[in-house]
Image (cartoon, rainbow, N blue to C red):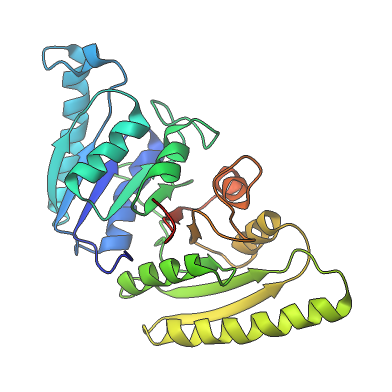
Amino acid sequence: MFLTKLDKVLLAIDFSTNSLGLLESVNDIFNNSVGTIVLTHVFEDAKEAKSAGAIWHEVLNNLSKYKKELITRGFEVKIVTPSGNPALEIVRLAEAEQVDMILIASSGKGYIQSALLGSTSFDVARIASCPVFIERGRNLTLDNKANKVNCLSKILLPTDFSAASLAALAIVRALHESIGEIVLVHVIEKSHSLDELEKKRNIAKLRLEELVEEVQTFGIKSSYMIKVEGTASRVLLQIMKEEGITMSIFPRTGAGIVKGLLIGSTAQAVLLNSETPLLMIPTPDHD
């Protein structure tokens, strides 16, 4: 089932400066349209989760500060503090609460340390059945939001014209009121001859023009690029910098562009090196 609206989201916090950027992402993406935010921090040690402990009180105090800030922005907030494996507990909580999206930071202290295999953000993106927004690079504080750029100002949308692209368009449709611009990109990594390359380029041009037209029906400014040199991940990272991309949308699986969050895949390479947020979306073949 494709996402059509956002009523409830899960916000996973580790209290790092990177995770503070998630508060701004909530505003950017949902613009007070979300009914409820489930605010969570997962205790890896069950003993720390006990209400009588000093660590539990510290965590609850910090979560309460986040809650207060979100309430002042017009959101309803629910705090949940499970214990166990962070990635599994976040996904279980998301399923139990039936949220439409998970928001999480990709690096920082606590249980989210990096986008390497085994990290919380990586595992959540890999196994969640709903879209996962991964915050990157916006080291803000509750009081310092200077020079902040809306993460939906200019979105990169790689496409291989698979069914996964339909899932990406569904999310674009759901967020269309907040999106400034979409840049669709198709990377042709391999061709055996100039004739084959030209054929692939012509087919991509026709399909991209159709996608641009569809995106424009949502009222969003859109354009497209066809790239024929380099590996997909390097090409996409270069485009992000050159075009001033503020967020990228990636399907979790797909042919060509993203074959899954495996070591060496385009998705992981971008996740490791991107300086801007990413939105990972489940695909129609996800169980």
Viewer-nearest residue: 17 or 219:
219
The residue at the point 42 percent across, 31 percent down is 112
Residue 123 relative to residue 226: left or right: left
The residue at the point 23 percent across, 36 percent down is 40
Can you say whether 76 is above or below 194 in the image?
Answer: above
In the rendered image, residue 232, in percent from the top left (x then y), is placed at 68, 59
The residue at the point 40 percent across, 40 percent down is 124
Quarter where residue 79 is shown: top left
Can you say whether 20 is above or below 4 in the image?
Answer: above
Viewer-nearest residue: 125 or 148:
125
In the rendered image, residue 141, in percent from the top left (x then y), is placed at 33, 41
Can you say whether 258 is above or below 5 in the image?
Answer: above
Residue 205 relative to residue 218: left or right: right
In the rendered image, residue 155, in percent from the top left (x then y), is placed at 48, 67
In the rendered image, residue 241, in percent from the top left (x then y), is placed at 62, 60
What residue occupies the far right of the structure in this picture? 193
